[in-house]
């Protein structure tokens, strides 16, 4: 290599399956620290992938009158957050068994308390659900275990001290605005522009083509992880009500190629050389799903993959145009971007299910995190030698 590769990393959501991404990101950060051949210019994520992307970004971000941020800080903030995310107390273990068990029973078509209904039929807007949630602290469940906003505030205590102008790594968080149907990205680049021009917290261009780009906030990250069956829509004042980003982008990548909002950049200097996707949802399925369990699992995976693939396929189209118009202005304004996939072992992917995305047990997290580190270490060793594949072929487990 002539110098460090500019790399952006997209982290798919997938509940606790994203613990695999924790392991992958940990090894990438170690490689960045030790080998100096990767310049991490961007992170993106949706749902649990958003939690991964945020915590890496937060550890790297410089703080005013504080630590400048580093790969070691990012490793610590990422892994500490997920250590706190899993069930730690006896009450949390029991609650995890209840919620995960309910999804598992639904998949197996086993009646729970004599009734086979989705997640016991609770509605996060209902009085029973709210009364149950209010009783959890008295039972020994930490507030941050069930309150995503509280968890994020504890994990990012210096968020208000981020030095936006000195950021070297951008982060994009995907969410879905419920009422107007906006595909939404919370973008640290917007914060940089607003701080630079001192115009207050007003986005430059809220809506374009039924999509919007807004300032990065912890509420925006909470919005990205808001499953409608488990949590009320996240209300962000003046901007709308939000659900999980799975319904729009999983994860956002297109915005890495848009002109930056904080100032003009000539040509494609701001565009990454490579885009790495930490794929949690397998692209392929062993066979046609027939049981309720398999149908539900595959539906969720397809929702998480198809929107992403459309954006990645367009990158491939632009690469082809670059070759076709190599002697024209188009090739000056754009550049080839190599897209690569980092994915779990096929057997692991085949053994997981929709219900296991809700298993917040420590043992389950540790197993997936360990596999993520193992897969990433092997992948990085081969990447340094120029011996890894590229999208779309490397997204598959077998030839088609």
Image (tube, rainbow, N blue to C red):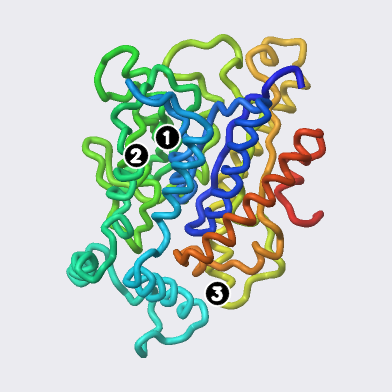
Spatial CA span between label 2 and label 3: 37 Å
User: What residue did someone put label 3 on?
Assistant: 293
Give the Cα distance between marks 3 and 1: 37 Å
Q: Quadrant of the C terminus?
A: bottom right
Q: Nearer the viewer, residue 19 or 215?
A: 19
Could you classify mark 3 by the number of other residues whose Cα lies within 10 Å: few (under 14), some (14-19), or many (20 or more)? some
Q: Position of residue 80 (x, y in %)?
A: 43, 48
Tell me the residue at 43%/28% (across/down): 61
Q: Residue at 70% of width from left, 24% of height from top?
A: 336
Rendered position, 14 above or below 219: below
Task: Look at the image and tell me in which quarter the N terminus lies.
Answer: top right
The residue to which callout 2 is attached is: 156
Q: Is residue 207 above or below residue 90?
A: above
Which label is found at residue 8?
Answer: none
Relative horizontal placement of residue 213, taking residue 154 as reference (left or right): right
The image quarter in which residue 155 lies:
top left
């Amino acid at each position: 290599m002539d110098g460090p590769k500019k790399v952006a990393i997209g982290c798919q959501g997938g509940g606790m399956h994203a613990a695999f991404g924790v392991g992958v990101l940990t090894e990438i950060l170690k490689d960045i620290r030790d080998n100096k051949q990767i310049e991490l210019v961007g992170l993106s994520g949706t749902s649990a992938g958003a939690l991964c992307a945020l915590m890496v970004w937060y550890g790297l971000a410089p703080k005013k009158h504080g630590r400048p941020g580093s790969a070691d800080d990012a490793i610590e903030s990422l892994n500490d957050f997920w250590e706190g995310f899993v069930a730690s107390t006896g009450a949390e273990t029991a609650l995890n068994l209840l919620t995960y068990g309910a999804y598992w029973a639904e998949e197996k078509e086993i009646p729970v308390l004599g009734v086979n209904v989705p997640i016991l039929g609770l509605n996060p807007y209902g009085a029973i659900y709210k009364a149950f949630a209010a009783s959890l602290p008295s039972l020994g469940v930490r507030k941050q275990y069930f309150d995503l906003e509280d968890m994020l505030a504890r994990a990012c205590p210096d968020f208000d001290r981020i030095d936006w102008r000195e950021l070297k790594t951008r982060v994009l968080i995907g969410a879905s605005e419920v009422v107007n149907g906006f595909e939404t990205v919370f973008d640290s680049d917007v914060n940089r522009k607003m701080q630079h021009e001192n115009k207050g917290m007003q986005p430059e261009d809220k809506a374009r083509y039924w999509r919007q780009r807004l300032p990065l906030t912890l509420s925006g990250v909470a919005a990205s992880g808001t499953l409608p069956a488990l949590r009320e829509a996240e209300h962000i004042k003046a901007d709308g009500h939000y659900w999980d980003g799975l319904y729009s982008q999983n994860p956002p990548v297109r915005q890495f190629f848009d002109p930056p909002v904080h100032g003009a950049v000539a040509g494609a200097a701001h565009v990454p050389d490579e885009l790495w996707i930490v794929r949690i949802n397998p692209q392929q399925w062993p066979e046609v799903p027939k049981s309720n369990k398999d149908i539900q699992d595959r539906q969720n995976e397809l929702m998480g993959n198809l929107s992403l693939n459309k954006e990645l396929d367009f990158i491939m189209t632009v690469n082809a145009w670059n070759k076709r118009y190599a002697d024209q202005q188009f090739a000056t304004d754009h550049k080839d971007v190599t897209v690569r996939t980092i994915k779990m072992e096929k057997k692991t992917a085949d053994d997981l299910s929709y219900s296991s995305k809700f298993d917040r047990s420590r043992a389950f997290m540790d197993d997936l995190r360990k596999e993520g580190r193992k897969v990433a270490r092997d992948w990085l060793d081969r990447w340094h030698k120029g011996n890894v594949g590229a999208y779309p072929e490397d997204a598959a487990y077998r030839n088609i």
